[in-house]
Image: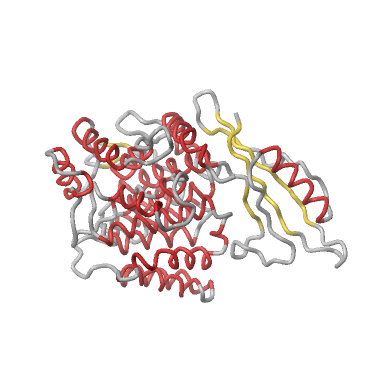
Amino acid sequence: MSWNYRAIIKVIQPPTEDSKPLKVYSVEEVYYNAEGTPTSWSYDHNPVSGYHSRVDLDFTLKKMQNVLDKPVLWVQPGKPPTLREYNEYTGLLSVYDRILGCLLGAALGDAIGAPVEMSPLPEVEQYLGGHVVPMNFESVQFGNGSYSFGQVTDDTQCIREVALSFDDEGMFQGDVFSQRLVAFSKTKGFVGHESNTDTALKRIDSGVEWDKAGTPAPSSGNGAAARAALLGVAGTAYKTGIDGDFVDMVEDSCLPTHLSDEARFGAVIVASVARALANEDGELLFERGMLARILLELSPRYRHLDMFSDYTRLLAILSGPEDGWEEAMARLAYDIQPDDSNWPGISPYVRPSVMWALTSFLLHPTEFDKMVARCLRPGGDVDTIAAIAGSLFGIFNGTCKLNTPLLQHITDRGDWKVSKYIKLAQDLFTKVAPHLKK
């Protein structure tokens, strides 16, 4: 069965000013085998051959839109290339595949980062060169040898519980989520979770209301942000805008474990970017426009936070020359790192860790290996950073750009292989599908 449709359209420089041709050179389709794992995609399923006029191409794309009942996205003639220097544009990506991409992207980033979480920087550098760059993790073990490569941590475990907390009407339920976290903590146990989270869940279990149980400021960890991207792609039953019910939903997902304004804002930023990637016609391709719109809509609620100014600084960086983005983004993340952190590298404090995850994704939005390497390079809370970036990558690209052989290693102590994530994505998509934008 093919779930994911992707039209790749390339702008061809016209041989004459009158003809102005465009060429559709590929439509990719992702297929799943009997076990439910993604196995292949076609790069030459081409409904349009040769060169066509704009009228011919537009007619063909409209036919495709009618057949697939999905919006057709394409580069308009005369507009500059939109993904920085790329002239390829991706569209027709199903919400199902974005949900699955979010879950698997988070799990894969989490699994790659977990073996070197809080490791000394020389060990991180050795891990990058020996395993991440070649994408070979056969000999990797961590947790004093308790786990082999593929084991996920609390970041993936919590995002799964988010997916399981939508009701049959496609609405996220914060009280259900809180009880699921408590049950999972008592029966299975989280891998690598924070002590603050454990304390908060014990408070819920003792009778404290779920929306008052989280750890208050000044504690502002990134745990709530790590699970927020799924709400951006699946929370389609909420208001179309970033404000209002959508933000309330994201904050509800934070409250069982995190009460501070900064922790909640970190989750809202991640969810808002995810929502833009899923619903705003690929607006990542205009990074400045995407971020400016999000900040404008969130300003009345969060502009009092120092953390809000972090993203206005990021917006200023994106307004400058691209050849300066990498250095300036890194400097920004380090500037907001707390001076008293005892973590090597980027700490779990929500300000620098979410910023590093987001900028790693923005610098490498279509290259998973390079994005994950950037997430890990500074060391620190690298499993959470890579999980956040991976979830956004999966929403933007779907499953076809994830490393399929590595996905086969994903596990949670022998459970939760890829086929279960596929079933989880199918179930969640079925619940939210009636609310999708037409």
Q: Which residue is at a point 55% across and 59% down the rendered structure image?
A: 283
**Colour setup of the view:** secondary structure
Q: Position of residue 411 (x, y in %)?
A: 36, 33
Q: Is residue 141 left or right of residue 63?
A: left
Q: Position of residue 381 (x, y in %)?
A: 29, 55
State the image quarter where residue 79 is shown: bottom right
Along the viewing direction, whichever of 235 and 11 lies nearer the viewer: 235
Quadrant including the C terminus:
top right
**Residue at the left extreme, as displayed:** 206
**Residue at the top extreme, as displayed:** 34
Quadrant including the N terminus:
top right
Q: Is residue 229 above or below residue 296?
A: above
Q: Which residue is at a point 11% across and 39% down the rendered structure image?
A: 206
Along the viewing direction, whichever of 388 and 205 lies nearer the viewer: 205
Q: Is residue 262 above or below residue 27?
A: below
Along the viewing direction, whichever of 124 and 418 lies nearer the viewer: 418
Q: Is residue 126 left or right of residue 49?
A: left
Q: Which residue is at a point 36% across and 70% down the rendered structure image?
A: 310
Q: Is residue 406 left or right of residue 47?
A: left
Along the viewing direction, whichever of 56 and 332 lies nearer the viewer: 56
Q: Is residue 122 above or below residue 212?
A: below
Q: Is residue 99 left or right of residue 226?
A: right
Q: Position of residue 424 (x, y in %)?
A: 42, 32
Q: How many marks?
A: 0
